[in-house]
Image: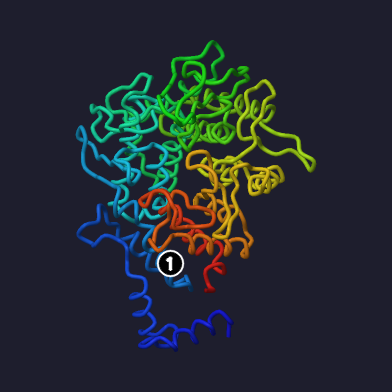
């Protein structure tokens, strides 16, 4: 008998009312020790029978009762708490808040629903949700391709206190206007994933076509081959990562073909405007747009433009975006085209660690060297303490580990021992809440940020489903 299982049986035998492992008493004991943290059925924002079936079947594959409990709380959290479905201008509409902030980020909303895509082909309610979100995101991009977050009311004024006095061109419907490359990549990833999962072309109409053409125009404009371009952003804040250099246009660059970004996926300002994970994500995005426009609209000319721009960006990233190391080259995090390079990684995705997860690179030798570097003292935002280890970023400061980085470490390895270590850190740092957080202190998980952060919750659920399919041994032992 497995020693862990033997120890669990021995432990349960000491608990009044607990039967042998697998018995009714054990189930009742687990339920009493780990009561569900989900809203009651009548208070859930959205329910999918396919999701509920997947939760039930996946839980059976998880030996650890606390890990199973975390999965059941976290995986449906986006649907349970953040989704508003309805109709807007005669079409299906879905608005997805990020959690404890009442606004929809293009990045977060796409990532929050991503794990449910494989179920959409068999669940019409999910298909309606996805069609509504694809339409809503297209509307948002058409309002302002430089904005990262939007309001439920397309004509409303931002209620985010920190954004109301921003020195930028705020438009109705915009909650925050931080230009981040990934804000335009994630909706394409979602749309492409939905099409691949379902074959449904219904949401890909002329409005979607126009919005995605605007994405390409924005990418091209932000190559900044002829001046600074139209985007600028400044904010009065004691935190310097909330604003940008040089009247809001960012640090000087040499125009080499990459896309400028003023902010990272963390919503923190870039130091050097060529963010490498963002540019690699843009390359993948452009190739997906080429495929979709060619298939949906027969627009081979536009598809050719997308491929040409992707080739140009990829060539520039290859030439300027790597650092020569003792054992071979690895990816930089940000560069300026003049030869200045920043090495670090930020937990928010896209990150260097997450490149294979987003299909931006394979797990080749360069990526493996990069992965080793970012999960080490070479990365100033890698933290290691008594509670765990992982990557953070300037957003929450030193010592603060983001569970998202631990999840990405597990997503990008086939090593069962490494995966189990990641699961252990995730299981032991939720501070008794039953949910993932934005960040926790390296030595004290009770010091955490954001008790309601749906992206982290759903990503954890996605990881468990992924492991149940690809690495089941990692879940079979307590």
Residue 315, image quadrant: top right
Q: Tell me if mark 1 has few (under 14), some (14-19) or many (20+) residues whose alpha carbon lies within 10 angstroms of its own.
A: many
Residue under the image location 65 percent in, 36 percent down: 343
Q: Residue 353 versus residue 131: which sits nearer the camera? A: 353
- Tell me the quarter of the picture where residue 274 sits: top right
Could you say where residue 414 lies in the image, as x and y percent from the top left? 62, 59
Which residue occupies 32% across, 70% down? 35
Q: How many marks?
A: 1
Query: At x 44% / y 88%, what residue is drawn?
Result: 14
**Nearest the camera: 234 or 225?**
234
Q: Is mark 1 on a helix, strand or loop?
A: helix
Figure check: 278 above or below 35: above
Rendered position, 188 above or below 147 = below
- Image quadrant occupied by the N terminus: bottom right
> Going by the picture, which residue comes out furthest to the top?
226
Point 55% across, 24% down: residue: 259
> Which residue, as the protein is rendered here, is positioned at the far right?
326
205 displayed left or right of 299: left
Q: Is residue 254 left or right of residue 249?
A: right
Position of residue 89 measured from the top left corner of the image (x, y, whole percent)? 20, 32
Say if 316 sits above or below 75 in the image.
above
**Disc 1 target residue:** 58
Residue 369 screen position, x and y as percent: 70, 45
Can you give x and y, in whole percent of width and height, for residue 234 in the image? 43, 22
């Amino acid at each position: 008998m497995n020693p862990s299982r033997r120890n669990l049986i021995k432990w349960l035998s000491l608990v009044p009312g607990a039967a042998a492992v697998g018995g009714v008493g054990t189930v009742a004991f687990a339920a009493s020790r780990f009561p569900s943290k989900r809203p009651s059925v009548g208070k859930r924002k959205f329910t999918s029978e396919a999701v509920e079936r997947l939760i039930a079947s996946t839980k059976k594959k998880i030996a650890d009762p606390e890990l199973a409990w975390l999965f059941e709380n976290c995986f449906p959290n986006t649907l349970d708490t953040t989704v508003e479905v309805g109709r807007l201008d005669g079409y299906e509409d879905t608005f997805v808040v990020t959690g404890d902030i009442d606004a929809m980020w293009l990045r977060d909303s796409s990532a929050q629903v991503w794990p449910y895509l494989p179920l959409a082909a068999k669940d019409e309610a999910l298909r309606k949700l996805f069609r509504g979100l694809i339409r809503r995101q297209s509307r948002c991009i058409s309002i302002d391709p430089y904005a990262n977050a939007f309001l439920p009311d397309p004509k409303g004024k931002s209620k985010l206190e920190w954004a109301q006095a921003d020195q930028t061109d705020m438009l109705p419907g915009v909650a925050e206007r931080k230009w981040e490359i990934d804000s335009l990549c994630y909706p394409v990833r979602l749309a492409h994933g939905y099409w691949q999962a379902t074959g449904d072309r219904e949401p890909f109409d002329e409005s979607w076509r126009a919005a995605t053409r605007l994405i390409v125009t924005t990418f091209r404009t932000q190559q900044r081959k002829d001046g600074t371009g139209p985007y600028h952003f400044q904010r009065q804040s004691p935190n310097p990562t909330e604003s940008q250099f040089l009247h809001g246009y960012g640090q000087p660059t040499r125009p080499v073909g990459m896309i400028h970004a003023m902010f990272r996926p963390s919503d923190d300002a870039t130091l050097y405007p060529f963010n490498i994970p963002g540019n690699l994500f843009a390359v993948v995005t452009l190739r997906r747009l080429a495929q979709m426009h060619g298939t949906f609209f027969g627009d081979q000319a536009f598809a050719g433009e997308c491929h040409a721009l992707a080739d140009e960006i990829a060539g520039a990233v290859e030439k300027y975006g790597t650092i020569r190391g003792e054992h071979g080259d690895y990816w930089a995090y940000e560069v300026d085209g003049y030869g200045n390079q920043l090495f670090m990684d930020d937990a928010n995705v896209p990150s260097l660690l997450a490149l294979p997860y987003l299909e931006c690179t394979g797990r080749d030798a360069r990526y493996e060297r990069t992965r080793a570097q970012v999960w080490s003292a070479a990365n100033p935002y890698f933290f290691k303490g008594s509670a765990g280890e992982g990557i953070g970023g300037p957003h929450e400061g030193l010592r603060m580990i983001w569970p998202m980085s631990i999840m990405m470490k597990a997503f990008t390895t086939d090593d069962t021992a490494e995966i189990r270590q990641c699961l252990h850190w995730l299981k032991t740092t939720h501070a008794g809440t039953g949910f993932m957080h934005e960040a926790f202190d390296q030595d004290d998980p009770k010091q955490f940020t954001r008790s309601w952060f749906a992206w982290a919750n759903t990503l954890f659920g996605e990881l468990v489903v992924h492991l149940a399919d690809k690495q089941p041994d990692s879940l079979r032992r307590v």
